[in-house]
Structures are given as C-alpha cells and as structure tokens.
Amino acid sequence: MKDTLDYLFGGNSLTKAQAQDLLTRVGQGQFSEAEIAALLTVFRMRKIKGEEMAGFRQAMLNLCIPVDFSDYNTIDVVGTGGDGKNTFNISTLSCFVLAGAGYKVTKHGNYGLSSVSGSSNMFEYFGYQFSNDTVKLRREVEETGITFFHAPLFHPAMKYVGPVRKALKVRTFFNIMGPIMNPSSPKNQLVGVSDLEIMDLYNQAMCDGHQRYMIVHSMDGYDEVSLTADTRYVSDETEDNLTPADFGFKKLKPEELSGGDSVEEAARIFVSILEGSGTQAQQNVVIANAALAIKCMHRQKSLADCVAEASESLKSKKALEVFKKLFNK
C-alpha cells in the first residue's frame, strides 16, 4: 500500500487491472484502516478516472455474494442518489411498473442517502424480509416478477471500508459505486446519475459489452428522468437528449416530485401512485422512467410504444398487483 499511495499522491492513476487488484486486496482485509483512509483521501483530492472506476467495480463484483439470474432477461432501475432533491421513490416505483408489464426485475438498493427514503427504506417499511437466499430471491422473480437485493447483505467486503467511511464523514468514491454493483449483474440496467462527470465515469466502467445500459441525468440535477427539464442519456449504443414532450408529457415543477418528510409519508405516496390516486405529475414521471427502461431492453420499440406499455401497467393496476403479491398485502 505504501508504494501505491506514493504513486497515487505523485499524481499518477491506476490501470483497470491495478485498480481491480488494489480494491480486491482492500476487500480481503489486507490493509489497516489508516491505509484505507489514506487511499480514500487520494480520490477526495483528485477525481477518479474511468479505468480506475471500471477496476474498482470489477473487484466489488468479484468479491460480492453473487446471484445467478442469467437464465432471465433481467433489468435494474437505480439512481446514485446525492442529488439533494428528496424526490419520492421514482426508480423503485418504476421497477414495479416494469414487473407489472411482464419484465423480470432484480432491484439492488440501500437506505436513503440524499432523500428521506431509499429503496431499502420502502421495502423494509412494507414488511419485506431482506435476504441473500437465492431460493427465496428466485421464487420472488418467478412468482411476482421482482426481487430485491439489500446491498449490505451482498457485499461483505465493505465491512473493512465501512468503519473508515463512517469515521471520515465525507463522501468517497463508494458513494457513487452502489448502482453499478448489482450482485446479479443484470443484462439490462437504467442508471440515474446526479451529474455529467459521473455519467462519463459510469459509461467508461460499463462499456465492456456485458450488458445493455442507459445512464440518465436530468439537466437540472436529478438522478433520473424528472420531466422538470431535458434528460441527457448515454447508452451502450448512442447518446442524446430527450425532452418531456418526447415522452408525450408536459414539463413538471420540482415541487411536484417531493418525497415528503418521513418514510411514512414516502410510503403513502408510493401506495397512492400504484392505486391510481397519485397526481398526474407523479404518475407521468414514474411512467417516463419505466418507459425508458423498456426502451433500454428493446431498442427496436419506439419511445411512444414504451410509454404506452408502462402506462398500461400502472393504470390497469398490474403494478399494484405485483406490489400486493410481493408484500402479501
């Protein structure tokens, strides 16, 4: 570690292979907390490079408890958090819409970072039992179309990093790695990021040809399609901008996406949208994100057709049926 730190503090960067080897050794408990703190400090002093992010990601996937869903055409919809917008659980709701439309969703998530309620908060509130039991997870996918991976149960290597992050009390590169560490390595992924720099990092980390992906960023700072501004996206094939009108919707106001001040309030919003009593704005933004996820999986489909498919799942209550079945409501 001493040689690596000297090298990094000298202004140098790691190759993908070097980054992968380094974080693998961190995740195996080979270094002291002081050494890990010094390493994390390097990447506070300068921005992480694409090759480094790709190597770190591969190390974390190699170290995680894997879940094999390769016989399904799965998708995950997730945001990095950190946008400070405190929206309701748009990505998680989109996952239920996707499952209601017949797609297989392997949702990876954690407790809220920049919002009151993250995906783990929602699943926990509704009585979901976090587990890394493959039999349980596979049964849920087969019977309901969706399952959930609570991140801490699948990344035991983080136990060596967690105390250091807690002591440092500052954001580290681990804060943005969560969405690209899904232990099932889904074949498709819609990832929302809070700024364009992270979008570029993710694109470099994900462009190994192993999955179809779209990385999205609303140009006013949201880590998802917000419909409050144009959305920038980059995929494994192309990049472009989308306007709210491209989805067939009107531009929204930020206050229309509020997630409330408590997990209970976020849960009330969550259920009301599935039951059809949410506002038009709430429904539209969920549909837009689910539609783009469908587009990510099926590039040949028009965006209008994807919107129609997502809308039908939500408005026909198919997404609600998935919710009730998963949570035994």
Image: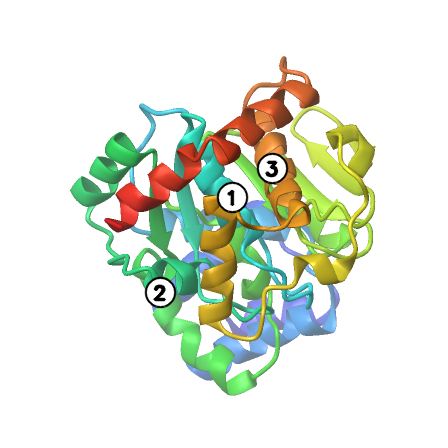
Question: Residue at 69% of width from left, 63% of height from top?
Answer: 83
Judged by depth in the image, the label closer to the viewer, 3 or 1, is 1
Q: Earlier in the sequence, mark 3 or mark 1?
A: 1
Q: Which residue is the site of mark 2?
A: 125
Residue type beneath disc 2: Tyr
Task: From the viewer's side, name the closer residue of 303 and 317.
Answer: 317
- Asked which quadrant contains residue 260, the reply is bottom right
Neighbours of disc 3 within 10 Å: few (<14), some (14-19), many (20+): many
Q: How far from the left and from the top, in percent, is residue 93?
A: 50, 47
Residue type beneath disc 1: Gly
Task: From the viewer's side, name the closer residue of 25 and 238.
Answer: 238
Establish if 179 lies above or below 167.
above
Which dot marks residue 287?
Answer: 3
Q: How far from the left and from the top, in percent, is residue 209?
A: 56, 27
Q: Which residue is the site of mark 1?
A: 276
Visible residue check, residue 180: no
Using residue 141 as the reference point, say whether residue 39 is left or right of it: right
Residue with the most extreme left position? 135
Residue type beneath disc 3: Ile
